Image: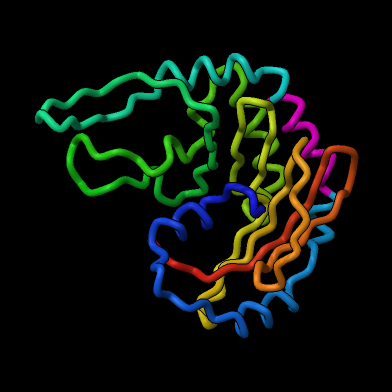
C-alpha cells in the first residue's frame, strides 16, 4: 500500500467514483521514474533525523497532543473544541510556502493537517531537526509523518508534472516494510536500501486541492 502522503490524502478527498484514471499516461511517467541516487547517498542524514525523532518520540507526541484541538458540531446544534490525542502527526518544513491548509475560511474551520512546519516541535528538538532539513534541502526532504509505533515516513521528493497532470513521489520509510504490489495499475515500487529503510517511488494523478 502506498505510504500516507499528502498527495494521496488530498487525492482521496477529491477523487470521484466515476472518474476513469489515465492509466496510459501514468504507466508512461512511471516507466520514466527512477530511484534518485542523491537520496540514497544522503541516507546518513535521514538516519540522523530518525535517531533524533525516535529518541524523543514520547516528548514529541506529548507536546503535539497537548496542542491538538478538534472542532466538533453536534446534531443538537452544540459545538465544542476538544483536545484529542492522535496516533500520528505530520511535520512539513516551511520553505516559504503556505503554512496551513484548512476547510473553508471560518474561525472554527479544521486544518486538513495539523501543522506544516517543524517549528511546532518541542523547542529543544527543533534546532537539530532544522539543521538536517537545511543540509538535505527541499529537493531531498519536504517533511515527515511520525506514527505512534515509531514508524517514520519521509516525503523525500514530490514533483508535479503539469503537462501530464501527474504527481511523482519519493518516500523513505523507517521500520515498516511496504506491501507487495501485485496490481499493475498501482504505480509504485520499493526497495530496501538499508536495514529497516525502504525507498519507494510512486506515480498518481494530480487531483488538486
User: Horizontally, is 194 left or right of 150 in the view?
Assistant: right
Pick whichever, 174 or 38, lies toward us: 174
Q: Quadrant of residue 122?
A: top right
For residue 195, above or below residue 209 = above
Q: Residue at x 16, y 26 (%)?
A: 79
User: What residue lies at 53% left-to-right and 42% top-to-bottom?
Assistant: 92
Q: Main secondary structure of the magenta part?
A: helix
Residue at left offset 65%, top offset 40%: 133
The magenta stretch spans residue 184:
no
Q: Is residue 42 above or below residue 189?
A: above
Please, which residue is most extreme toward the right here? Answer: 194
Could you say where residue 116 lies in the image, as x and y percent from the top left?
Answer: 47, 40
| Residue 42 higher or lower than 53, as above or below | below
Residue beneath the point at 70% across and 74% down: 30
Q: Which residues are magenta?
A: 42-53
Q: Position of residue 2 (x, y in %)?
A: 64, 54
Q: Quadrant of the C terminus?
A: bottom left
Rendered location of residue 153, percent (x, y): 66, 42
Residue 186 location (% of width, % of height) = 66, 67
Using the image as rendered, state which of residue 29 and residue 130 is in the foreground: 29
38 up-or-down from 124: above or below: below
* Color theme of the render: rainbow
Amino acid at each position: 500500500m502506498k505510504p500516507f502522503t499528502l498527495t494521496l490524502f488530498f487525492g482521496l478527498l477529491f477523487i470521484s467514483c466515476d472518474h476513469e484514471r489515465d492509466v496510459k499516461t501514468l504507466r508512461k511517467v512511471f516507466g520514466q521514474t527512477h530511484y534518485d541516487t542523491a537520496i540514497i547517498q544522503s541516507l546518513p542524514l535521514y538516519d540522523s533525523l530518525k535517531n533524533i525523532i525516535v529518541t524523543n518520540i514520547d516528548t514529541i507526541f506529548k507536546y503535539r497532543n497537548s496542542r491538538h484541538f478538534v472542532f466538533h458540531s453536534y446534531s443538537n446544534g452544540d459545538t465544542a473544541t476538544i483536545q484529542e490525542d492522535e496516533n500520528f502527526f505530520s511535520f512539513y518544513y516551511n520553505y516559504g510556502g503556505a503554512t496551513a491548509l484548512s476547510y473553508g475560511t471560518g474561525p472554527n474551520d479544521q486544518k486538513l493537517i495539523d501543522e506544516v512546519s517543524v517549528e511546532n516541535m518541542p523547542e529543544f528538538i527543533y534546532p537539530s531537526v532544522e539543521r538536517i532539513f537545511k543540509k538535505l534541502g527541499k529537493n531531498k526532504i519536504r517533511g515527515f509523518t511520525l506514527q505512534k509505533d515509531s514508524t517514520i515516513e519521509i516525503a523525500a521528493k514530490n514533483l508535479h508534472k503539469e503537462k501530464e497532470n501527474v504527481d511523482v513521489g519519493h518516500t523513505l520509510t523507517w521500520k515498516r516494510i511496504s506491501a507487495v504490489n501485485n496490481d499493475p495499475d498501482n504505480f509504485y515500487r520499493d526497495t530496501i536500501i538499508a536495514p529497516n529503510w525502504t525507498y519507494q517511488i510512486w506515480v498518481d494523478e494530480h487531483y488538486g486541492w
